Image (cartoon, rainbow, N blue to C red):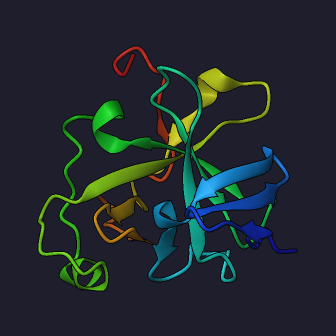
Amino acid sequence: MSAAVQEQTDNGLAKIHTTRFGELEIQVDKIITMTTPFLGFPDSHRFIMRQNGGKSPFMWLQSLDDPDLAFVVIPAAALIPQYTPEIPASALKDLQTTSTKPEILLILTIPPGKPLEMTANLLGPIVLNTDKRLACQVLLDPAVYDVRWPVFTETND
């Protein structure tokens, strides 16, 4: 199923339909293109970032290619300021950036009805070139980074 742009206007806006948010009006120049798709989601290449609410640090990364696919994400610096993994040079090249500190987002997993058991994927962060609207998911060292890092623990909160 495609959440492809249903209607595009002359003012740079487009309407899309999503399962979670219904019909959305988006700015076409804010579309993020994945240089490689997420593992397990080979047909989703285009996304839009959507704030979760007023002052919430959480955001939604909504697929424009699959109306059912949306990831809860958070800027890594907002959750773990000391999280500064070395991004592979190949990923930086794919993102067309020379920055050694690109924007990093963490995908969160929230078990249904158990928000205090939320985990962050430190092993496979999303790296973003905000200027070019390009992103990729990188795989880091599993001996160093956890795929299910608990967000709410006595030492984390």
Q: In the depicted view, which residue is nearer to us: 93 or 111?
A: 93
139 over 123 or under it: above or below: below
Percent position of residue 101, x then y:
15, 58
Residue under the image location 53 percent in, 40 percent down: 59
Percent position of residue 126, x then y:
41, 61
Residue under the image location 50 percent in, 24 percent down: 56
Quadrant location, the N terminus: bottom right
Where residue 129 sits, quadrant-wise, is bottom left
Left or right: 119 as drawn, with respect to 89? right
Q: How many marks?
A: 0
Where residue 109 sits, quadrant-wise, is top right
Left or right: 74 as drawn, with respect to 68? left
Left or right: 125 as drawn, with respect to 81? right
156 over 91 or under it: above or below: above
Q: Residue furthest front?
A: 10
Percent position of residue 53, x then y:
58, 26
Quadrant location, the C terminus: top left
Left or right: 92 as drawn, with respect to 46? left
146 over 137 or under it: above or below: above
Does the image show residue 136? yes
Percent position of residue 77, x then y:
27, 38
Residue under the image location 74 percent in, 59 percent down: 15
